[in-house]
DNA sequence: TTGTATGCGTTATCAA
DNA sequence: TTGATAACGCATACAA
């Protein structure tokens, strides 16, 4: 920060801008500047006016000793940590990545620091991490897809305001949910396929334990019903939101019910797997089968061909969440409306003239 | 803050397992159990034996009040935060994701908590985040691809031991580097293509500012030289490690020098872009052009066809890093050997009989 | 084995 | 405007 670069070159005696003493305290600065600790504190926090002369003396001392206030001590004394606990189910999931980015970027400006942890889809871990947040006295908590039931969340929210993404809860001053309209998204996607002339539309579902996954299935069924197409349980296969599950599900589907002309996958990762399984069998997309995903992961627009999918504005949702939690911390009321999803039509779907052409015996 | 939640549900008196007082202190527990604060502290940390009777009394009080020690106070008093600062260039990058997972999982067992932040490839941010870590008194720091120069890193390492991934530094007790052998990886990949009969092998490079990217270019050139193939600058295009850069580079390449039979991309994301650009032009992979990437992102095995690439064992590297930093904190010596990379041969490369067949005018 | 006293580095309250 | 002084919640050296 105060690196002057004047002695990078060997030869000249090195006078580092980062001094040796790692533990300069506020008190040391006060002594060096000839003022009281309180004055230094005031300057640091801008909590009161001080004489310019003293101000300068203190600032000089801070620069000279490269002093950095101890965040721990500050938090202990003030009761505020300026820290937000962010709980994800899996840090490494491409799906959460954009959320984290949105959260981090919006938190930086108001001066909060996010702490990311992941519970690995394990409800016990989720609890443990939440308690860890509380032990750390975070000022607020953002949950990405909480699995805990609402009453438990409500209990925890007494320690710090909580915002739950992708879920609707009974909103209060300390607990709020930002629901995502999975049902509508899935309905739109299915509707799109129907409009393109598809009638036998398969669905590869997500884990039955996920609320989202269920909503997406409901959306699929709703669109079918609206179009007067009977629901066929044989066209539904179980996936797990992962690529491997998509592969397996598609293989079962092709073996059992090979006449579908379109597949709607509960998420993009599932679609990647399904795509590969079809590729292996020589089934062309979209010539033989149309494919639609859900989430619009960054990679999806680089699939070959680029994937038609339901876009979740994750980055924006992340920003909203960050702003929301800050408002809750500041005791301001917030109004969170459900996030609408939009269908992004790319190149894995095509119009067919019903009845669907029989899928070809293209060479592998 | 002192909301006691005793009347969440109208009607039935709710007896929650999470008690009302959010700020139970160690002292309160001591009083409730009829012992001294130090005894409670000892039980909490297992730092000394206490009478079973007292032990039980304390544990009962802890359970009754749902007491959670204040991490801040504990750290302030002990001088240890049990926290590791992890600096990434971009939290949301699929490339860093696996590293983070490895780090997080290995840190959990020894009782450390990672704090992830990202500097967004900005060197000023990198410095700011590092200073933030120091202000938080983290016990150790892991850097994923540091951009700061070694002397600055050395300066910072006086505050907390630092481990730099993907870079070699002059190792000391407080600063260590875990280099990754990009050169060898790129050399192997190129060599593979040469062995398959390719002679006109294009290369889409990464940002010239990245050490890794340069090493990969060097590996490419080395393999060519070893095979007695002259380096042709016309076959090298500039990318940016992102998909968009891959698309653009491939388009330029095809326009300018359409006779290559293989492309080696500096990373997988670049390869995704290049793949799409070829797809758009009706150039088939691997029938017309062989394609090799670098990194082996999780998605790469689901590309169609699955991408041949150089695998970085990122998850394992993450684990190594976590173990390493813990050892450094404990003042144990560590031995870090460069990580070897391995070529994963999948389906985007194929053997050709030189001279390469002229690339087809397949319909778009 | 247990308790007392002191310190960790700040902020905040209260006088001056 | 400034400076003592008391928290903040815990760990720990020392004494018992």
Image (cartoon, coloured by chain):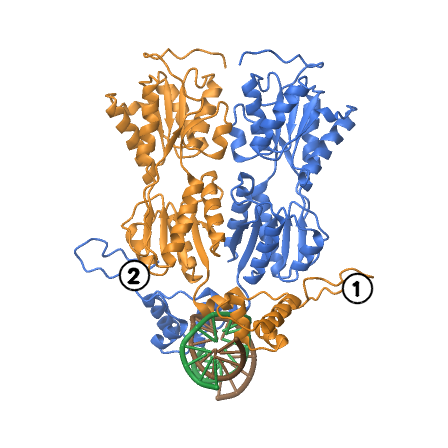
Chain colours: A blue, B orange, C brown, D green
Give B309 or B39, whichever is nearer the viewer: B39
Residue B88 percent across, percent down from the top left: 43, 47
Q: Using the image, determine if residue A63 lies above or below residue B250.
A: below
Residue A79: name its quadrant: bottom right
**Relative horizontal placement of residue A15, taking residue A336 as reference (left or right):** left
Point out residue A361 in the picture as x, y percentages from the top left corner: 59, 11
Dot 2: element: loop
* Residue at mark 2: A17
At which x and y percent is residue A200? Answer: 71, 20
Label 2 marks which chain's residue? Answer: A
Quarter of the figure that contains the N terminus of chain A = bottom left
Q: Is residue B59 left or right of residue B126?
A: right
* Residue under label 1: B13
> Quick check: B73 left or right of B213?
right
Residue A360 vertical position relative to residue A164 in the rendered view, above or below: above
Which residue occupies the extreme left position in the image? Answer: A11
């Amino acid at each position: 920060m105060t690196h002057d670069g004047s002695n990078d070159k060997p030869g000249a005696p090195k006078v580092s801008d980062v001094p040796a003493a790692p533990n300069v305290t506020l008190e040391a600065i006060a002594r060096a500047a000839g003022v009281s600790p309180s004055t230094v504190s005031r300057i640091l926090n801008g909590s009161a006016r001080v004489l310019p002369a003293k101000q300068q003396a203190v600032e000089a001392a801070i620069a000279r000793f490269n002093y950095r206030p101890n965040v721990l001590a500050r938090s202990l004394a003030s009761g505020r940590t300026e820290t937000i606990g962010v709980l994800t189910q899996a840090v490494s999931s491409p799906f959460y990545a954009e959320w984290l980015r949105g959260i981090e970027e919006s938190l930086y400006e108001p001066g909060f620091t996010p702490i990311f942890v992941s519970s690995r889809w394990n409800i016990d871990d989720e609890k443990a991490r939440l308690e860890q947040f509380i032990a750390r006295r975070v000022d607020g908590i953002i949950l990405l897809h909480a699995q805990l039931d609402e009453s438990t969340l409500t209990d925890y929210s007494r320690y710090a305001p909580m915002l739950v993404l992708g879920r609707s809860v009974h909103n209060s001053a300390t607990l709020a949910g930002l629901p995502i309209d999975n049902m509508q998204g899935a309905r739109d996607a299915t509707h799109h396929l129907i409009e393109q002339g598809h009638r036998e539309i398969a669905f590869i579902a997500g884990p039955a334990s996920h609320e989202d996954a269920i909503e997406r299935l409901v959306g699929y069924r709703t669109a079918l019903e609206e179009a007067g197409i009977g629901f066929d349980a044989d066209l539904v296969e179980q996936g797990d939101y992962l690529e491997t599950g998509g592969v397996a599900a598609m293989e079962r589907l092709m073996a059992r019910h090979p006449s579908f002309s379109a597949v709607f996958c509960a998420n993009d990762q599932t679609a990647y797997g399904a795509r590969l399984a079809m590729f292996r069998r020589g089934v062309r997309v979209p010539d033989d089968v149309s494919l639609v995903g859900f989430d619009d992961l960054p990679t999806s627009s680089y699939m070959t061909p680029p994937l038609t999918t339901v876009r979740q504005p994750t980055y924006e949702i992340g920003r909203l969440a960050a702003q929301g939690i800050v408002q809750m911390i500041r005791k301001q009321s917030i109004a969170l409306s459900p996030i609408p999803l939009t269908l992004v039509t790319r190149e894995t779907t095509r119009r067919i003239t019903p009845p669907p052409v029989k899928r070809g015996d293209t060479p592998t």
